[in-house]
Amino acid sequence: PAPKPEVLLLQRIADVGIERLETHFDVIHLWDSPDPDRDMQYHAETARGVLTGANIGLTPQQVDRFHKLEIISLHGVGLDRVDIDHAKHQGLRIAYTPDVLTADVADMGFGLMMSTLRRLPQGHNFVMAGHWAEGKQPPLTRSLTGKRLGILGLGRIGQAIAARAEAFGMEITYTNRSRRTDVPYAYEPDLQRLADWCDVLMVAAASSPDMQALVDDSVLAALGSEGVIVNVGRGVLIDEDALITRLERGELLGAGLDVFANEPHINDALLTLDNVVLSAHRASATVETRNAMAIQSVEHLQQHFAGSKPTHLATPE
Ligand code: 8YV
């Protein structure tokens, strides 16, 4: 039989995916290597595929080291850690897993919004600390139902959040690179005006270099002291220093964050704030979704090496 194509695995994926990968490929596990860079170099002449996390990616410099690389299979939807133009130029395919994680990421966005407005973690800590039993009451929180939701980025995930928000009687307006003709929601091209209008600003956009700190201090100022911000996109979309300063001063009501500019090393100041709900980039991290992402990212490699086109390609053909 022909030798199995060599595939480098840069991120640990669900066991169902690893088993499938092992069946069809000669798998080099770099995710648990003490020196992944050295090992990548060692396999640069033989590897034909790389399977990597969307938030790990593969830089153009790394891509250029390979001699026989044909495909990067991303485990995840974000394309901010790969260079699509560079890959196309090198004749590489990039596959990704857009649909399988949409519902879970939307649920997380919604959950962070609910948790921030209703202060669910703070309430939990209050009970656990015994304060209720001491006869104390936590402060009142804010309603979610009926609030105005501004969505930054009305892609798959943004739309799934909007569908959930509709069920809660929220008013919905969105901003996006362009107006969508297939949604019933109001479009506001100007992010600052959107922030001025809404109670909750939901960041659900993909990140690209021109979008760094798109949510800047003036947007946060427009959101105002009764405003809440939630981020399930990428940390770099928000000017994090400005966000922290405004949260410290009470110039925002709160923030629910799953992603951070320099994760997993997050700004220490966030850890001292009472008006934040923090999550460790877990929006797609359910058993169900991580199994589906693992299987799909391996399937894309199988399709490619069987001579067909992977179902979800980020490099158009
Ligand atoms: C994961 C993600 O954290 O899909 C994305 O873009 O950021 C998340 O799903 C990660 O990619 C898992 O590999």
Image (tube, helix red, strand yellow):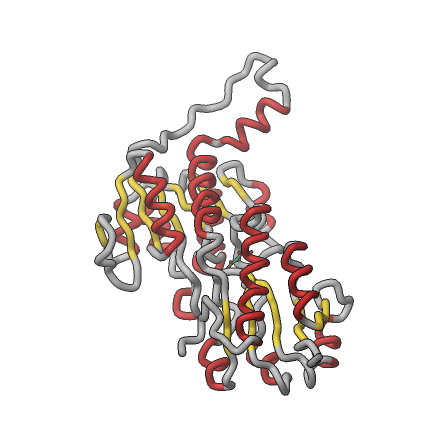
Compared with 128, 176 (above or below) is below
Residue 55 placement, left or right of 220: right
Report x, y in % for residue 6.
68, 76
Q: Position of residue 251 (x, y in %)?
A: 40, 42
Is residue 204 rendered to the left or right of residue 196? right
Residue 75, quarter of picture: bottom right
Among the 4 quarters of the image, the one containing residue 154: bottom left
Quadrant where the N terminus sits is bottom right
| Residue 114 at least partly seen | yes
Residue at x 37% of width, y 50% of height: 220
* Residue positioned 57% across, 49% down in the render: 285
- Taking the image as drawn, is residue 269 in sight? no
Please provide percent x and percent y for residue 237. 43, 59
Image vertical order of residue 287 relative to residue 51, above or below: above
At 50% across and 22% down in the image, what residue appears? 138
Quadrant of the frame with the C terminus? bottom left
x%, y% of residue 215?
Answer: 38, 56
Quarter of the rendered structure image containing ligand 1: bottom right
Q: Is residue 27 above or below residue 154?
A: below
- Which residue occupies the foreground of this view, 286 or 264? 286
Residue 169 horizontal side relative to residue 134, left or right = left
